[in-house]
Amino acid sequence: QVQLVESGGGLVQPGGSLRLSCEVRGSIYSANTMGWYRQAPGKERELVAIRGVGSNTRYGDSVKGRFTISKDNARNVVYLQMNSLKLEDTAVYYCKAIVRGHELWGQGTQVTVSS
């Protein structure tokens, strides 16, 4: 069974950094597109960053200049480096991947920014 396995969430102070990882497991095929979304309490899920075919990358406006997405195609892993974290970055972060046309979601990892 193909699944996405996320790691790297946690508690960090404002201004700090975290790195999230998400791996596609159980598939012999590479994910064409991988990325991250997040959902804060009482808010809709929103795009954080996504990396598609040919390194085509898109970021949510609120994270531009602070977050960086990267992808290891050989390992089918996507990373999200989050710097200069703010209180409003607190949310559950979900990994998304598209493998052979099928959309997959991870279980979510909590990121809490608090002093």
Image (spheres, rainbow, N blue to C red):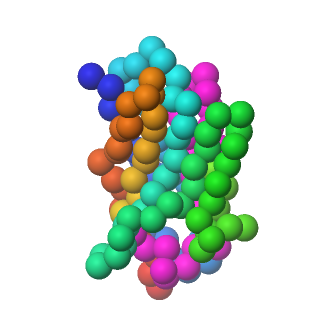
Left or right side of 51 for 22: left
Q: What residue sits 49% from the left and 73% below the top?
A: 89
Q: What residue sits 34% from the left and 44% below the top?
A: 106
**Residues rendered magenta in the picture:** 70-91
Image quadrant where one finds the N terminus: top left
Q: What residue sits 46% from the left and 34% below the top?
A: 98
Up-down: is 90 above or below 82? Answer: below
Q: What residue sits 29% from the left and 79% below the top?
A: 42
Q: Position of residue 18 (x, y in %)?
A: 55, 60
Up-down: is 58 above or below 27? Answer: below
Q: Is residue 50 visible?
A: yes
Question: Closer to the camera, 74 or 43?
Answer: 43
Question: Closer to the camera, 34 or 93?
Answer: 34
Q: Position of residue 104 (x, y in %)?
A: 36, 38
Q: Position of residue 75 (x, y in %)?
A: 56, 25
| Residue 6, image quadrant | top left
- 104 in the magenta segment: no
